């Protein structure tokens, strides 16, 4: 009897693994293929722009290549890093940290709609990249400032509308997945392991948790899916991204989420009022001075013993074989503060707010760290 049960368990595991592999494999193929198409479109836009400017093909060929000083993994190596990430993701699922992920892009029809919208936007992004134009958002908000800080009013990543429209919010996750070949959601999920450990043996309903700079809900949504009694507050400066995050949640989960339009450097929480905060892909977008303010705020709002789950880009030296790739990033994707982020001493920054690092791991192109408030 016991033997039969263990055989059934084994078979169940294998079916789950096969399903997981099929799902993530097709995800990588889908997004990597979009990356190839996007690159082809971008190259055509570059050629056209040069022709318009009367530049000879020859001069474009002799133009200096992007700066490259450190090691850069080839495509095969990148895919093996992604495979290692997925192996860890599956191990986390099997260890019970979170369930098998739900598809975040809805049914096939909405996947295709997003694909069309993404591809339609690629030439616009490429034109901004060619002309190094990242000030459309600033120009559009020049008069009023829209109540937003100056550093925020830019076309980060050469994105159409920056962070400031529903269209931008709708395609943001798709764009990021194309950039990271379908591995972004799995990188974020590594942060859920820390939340899972924190929630183990506690009544989830009494844990005060907020995701700072939640964007379209990249971590908040899977957190609410994984932990069925947890409540979470998403904070972001972008109203359209918050609206998208709210609407993207299944109706049954909306009651456990609240969304606040606020700046991370001035969080709308009382001192020492939260048990856990997460912060995903924010710090590399911030000017150094603001980074320090936000780090202080995260420390301020956490209770003693509270945890910060930090997921962001790798920094220089985290995974030396990827250092050259990180150097390419800021020019290709308008990341004005990224270079300073690469060398920022994050542990020192967080220590000012009383946060001490407990764990650190890399996950493909991300670093995942756990800090604890003293
Ligand atoms: C790269 S996105 C990351 C979003 C999300 N955490 C994720 O995992 O996809 C950066 C987000 O930070 C938000 N943001 C940037 N600066 C901010 C600030 N000072 N305060 C609050 N949100 C900010 C942007 O509006 C955007 O939604």
Image (tube, rainbow, N blue to C red):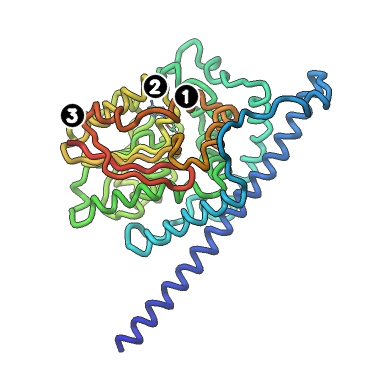
Residue 133: horizontal and vertical position, in percent? 62, 20
> Real-space Cα distance between discs 1 and 2?
7 Å
> Real-space Cα distance between discs 3 and 1?
28 Å
Q: Secondary structure at mark 2?
A: helix
- Can residue 23 be seen here? yes
Residue 282: horizontal and vertical position, in percent? 41, 32
In-front residue for pair 137/167: 137
Residue 271 marker: 3
Q: Secondary structure at mark 1?
A: loop
Residue matched to label 2: 288
Foreground mark, 3 or 1, reads 1
Foreground mark, 2 or 3, reads 2
Determine crowd level at label 1: few under 14, some 14-19, many 20+ residues with C-alpha closer than 10 A: some
Residue 358: horizontal and vertical position, in percent? 26, 43
Indicate left or right for 149 with 298 as reference. right
Determine crowd level at label 3: few under 14, some 14-19, many 20+ residues with C-alpha closer than 10 A: some
Nearest to N terminus: mark 1 or mark 2: 2
């Amino acid at each position: 009897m016991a033997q039969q049960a263990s055989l059934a368990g084994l078979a169940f595991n294998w079916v789950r693994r096969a399903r997981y592999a099929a799902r993530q494999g097709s995800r990588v193929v889908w997004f990597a293929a979009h990356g190839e198409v996007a690159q082809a479109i971008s190259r055509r836009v570059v050629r056209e722009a040069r022709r318009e400017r009367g530049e000879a093909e020859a001069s474009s060929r002799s133009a200096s290549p992007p700066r490259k000083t450190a090691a850069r993994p080839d495509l095969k190596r990148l895919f093996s890093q992604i495979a290692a990430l997925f192996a860890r993701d599956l191990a986390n699922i099997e260890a019970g940290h979170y369930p098998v992920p739900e598809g975040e892009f809805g049914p096939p029809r909405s996947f295709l709609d997003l694909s069309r919208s993404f591809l339609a936007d690629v030439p616009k992004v490429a034109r901004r990249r060619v002309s190094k134009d990242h000030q459309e958002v600033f120009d559009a908000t020049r008069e009023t400032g829209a109540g937003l800080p100056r550093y925020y009013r830019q076309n980060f990543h050469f994105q159409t509308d920056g962070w400031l429209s529903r269209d931008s919010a709708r395609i943001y996750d798709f764009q990021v997945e194309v950039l990271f070949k379908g591995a972004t959601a799995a990188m974020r999920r590594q942060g859920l392991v820390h939340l899972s450990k924190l929630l183990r043996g506690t009544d989830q309903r009494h844990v005060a948790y907020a995701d700072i700079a939640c964007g379209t809900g990249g971590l908040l949504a899977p957190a609410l899916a994984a932990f069925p009694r947890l409540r979470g507050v998403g904070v972001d400066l972008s109203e359209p991204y918050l609206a998208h995050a709210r609407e993207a949640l299944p109706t049954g989960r909306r009651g456990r989420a609240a969304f606040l339009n606020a700046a991370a450097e001035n969080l709308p929480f009382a001192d020492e009022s939260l048990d856990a905060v997460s912060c995903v892909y924010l710090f590399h977008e911030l000017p150094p001075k603001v980074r320090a303010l936000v780090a202080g705020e995260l420390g301020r709002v956490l209770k003693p013993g509270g945890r910060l789950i930090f997921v962001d880009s790798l920094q220089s030296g985290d995974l030396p074989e990827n250092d050259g790739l990180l150097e390419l990033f800021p020019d290709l994707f308008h990341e004005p503060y990224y270079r300073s982020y690469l060398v920022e001493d994050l542990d020192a920054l967080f220590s000012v707010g009383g946060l001490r690092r407990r764990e650190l791991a890399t996950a493909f192109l991300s670093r995942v760290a756990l800090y604890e408030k003293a």
